């Protein structure tokens, strides 16, 4: 199949392009490079030996995206494009609503007019808000605590409404837990701009002595050691989840939601220890105040994806730490 990958130059998108190409699909990428570099796609081409037609345009530019649909026989879309920084979304809510929602509306409109019937959407565990119990199934109540999360929630509702008007079409809403790790080659990985918000890129920058020490946000939660517990998932497992979702969507109609996580919770201290063991790099840390808005624990019930998509995460915490470190060590300044 020929797949349009929006946001394909980004962290999860570039890893997914590799898996799609390895499975024999053709890939076309649209990305305005607001949070990525085209170098990632050159490296994907290098790793796979395949060519990727690339459009450096904004997904909300209807005229440009019409051209993309006209120039390729696109059969399905994987939609990663979006802004994703929670803190930034609180400061710039209109930019987030405009970018994430308007681009999705343009995409839906053009998919329908070009009769492209299958869409995989990047949602997030953030749509579970402050979940009350774990593991979290897809049926848990939905809410959001910040503008970024609300864009994901609103887009889920929009896609659910849209799909009922599109005969024979199907959409998969994939709710990711905490993606970490990098391609085993060390050639592509996460390239955060500025000070990382997320735990794993912060740890790798401490290991690389780019930052002095890690601040652990709270050690008085009701968890195994008092620090926050999350469901870290290797980005290559996550990428494979998209391939599996696409395989399933071809035979489905309507909207289908899946959690993509491992089902295992890991605390901040456990991740720090695993990283030190896997890489031999010391991670100095201090305990600081809780980060506002953080929940104690969040991990997935991913049994639906296992049952219906025949997908399961297979890479463990050691592999996640090792691959994150290889990427950081071999690319100290990311793609720059
Ligand atoms: P990323 O920032 O690396 O990738 C997103 C890509 O979209 C970037 O390359 C960016 O340049 C592009 N983009 C943004 N707005 C665009 C627009 N209007 N037109 C064209 N391109 C645009 O982020 P990622 O971590 O790869 O995340 C991919 C998707 O998964 C996002 O939608 C994100 O919200 C979602 N998600 C990510 C996480 C995570 O922790 N990484 C967790 C849950 C969900
Ligand atoms: N965390 C931390 N220090 C950091 C970044 C994160 O202690 O510099 C903690 C955070 O409080 C949470 C866990 O690490 O318990 C995962 O945080 P991240 O931002 O990576 O993911 P999210 O909270 O969005 O699930």
Image (cartoon, grey):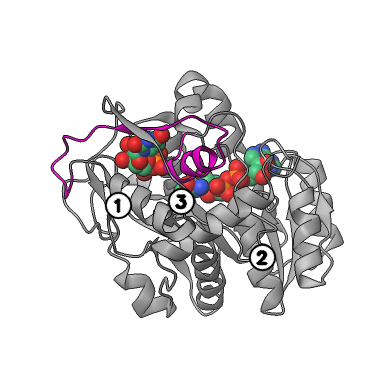
Disc 1, SS: helix
Depth check, front residue: 138 or 11: 11
- Marks 2 and 3 in Cβ contact (< 8 Å): no
Disc 2, SS: loop
The span picked out in magenta is: 197-225
Q: x, y percentage for residue 146? A: 38, 30
Mark 3 Cα shell of 10 Å, populated few (<14), some (14-19), many (≥20) = many
Residue 262, image quadrant: bottom left
Instruction: Name the residue at the left extreme.
Output: 222
Q: Which residue is mark 3?
A: 123
Depth check, front residue: 116 or 315: 315
Mark 1 Cα shell of 10 Å, populated few (<14), some (14-19), many (≥20) = some
The quarter of the picture showing ligand 2 = top left
- Marks 1 and 2 in Cβ contact (< 8 Å): no
Residue displayed at 43% across by 76% down:
311
Would the CB of label 2 be found within 8 Å of ligand 1? no
From the image, which quarter does the N terminus lie in? bottom right
Q: Which residue is mark 1?
A: 270
Q: x, y percentage for residue 4? A: 70, 60
Left or right of 166, for residue 148: left
Residue 222 within the magenta-colored segment of the rendering = yes
Q: x, y percentage for residue 286? A: 32, 30
Residue 240 within the magenta-colored segment of the rendering = no
* Looking at the image, residue 14 lies above or below residue 51: above
């Amino acid at each position: 199949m020929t797949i349009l990958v929006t946001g394909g130059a980004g962290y999860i998108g570039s890893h997914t392009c590799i898996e799609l190409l390895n499975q024999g699909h053709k890939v076309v990428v649209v990305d305005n490079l607001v949070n990525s570099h085209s170098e990632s796609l050159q490296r994907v081409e290098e790793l796979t030996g395949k060519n990727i037609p690339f459009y450096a345009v904004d997904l909300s530019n209807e005229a440009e995206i019409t051209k993309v649909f006209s120039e390729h026989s696109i059969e399905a879309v994987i939609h990663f494009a979006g802004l994703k920084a929670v803190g930034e979304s609180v400061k710039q809510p209109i930019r987030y609503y405009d970018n994430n929602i308007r681009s999705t509306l343009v995409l839906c409109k053009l998919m329908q007019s070009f009769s492209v019937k299958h869409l995989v959407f990047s949602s997030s565990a953030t749509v579970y808000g402050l979940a009350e119990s774990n593991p979290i199934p897809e049926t848990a109540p939905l809410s959001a605590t910040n503008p970024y999360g609300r864009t994901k929630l609103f887009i889920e509702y929009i896609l659910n409404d849209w799909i009922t008007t599109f005969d024979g079409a199907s959409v998969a809403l994939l709710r990711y837990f905490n993606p970490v790790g990098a391609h085993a080659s060390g050639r592509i990985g996460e390239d955060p701009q500025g000070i990382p918000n997320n735990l794993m890129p912060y740890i790798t920058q401490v290991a690389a002595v780019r930052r002095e020490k890690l601040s652990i946000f709270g050690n008085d939660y009701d968890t195994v050691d008092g620090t926050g517990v999350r469901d870290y998932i290797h980005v290559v497992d996550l990428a494979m989840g998209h391939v599996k979702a696409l395989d399933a969507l071809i035979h489905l109609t309507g909207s289908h939601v899946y959690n993509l996580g491992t089902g295992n919770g890991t605390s901040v201290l456990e991740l720090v220890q695993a990283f030190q063991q896997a890489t031999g790099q010391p991670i100095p840390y201090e305990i600081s105040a809780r980060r506002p808005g953080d929940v104690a624990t969040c991990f997935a019930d991913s049994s639906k994806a296992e049952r219906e998509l025949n997908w399961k995460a297979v890479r463990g915490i050691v592999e996640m730490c090792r691959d994150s470190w290889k990427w950081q060590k071999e690319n100290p300044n990311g793609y720059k």
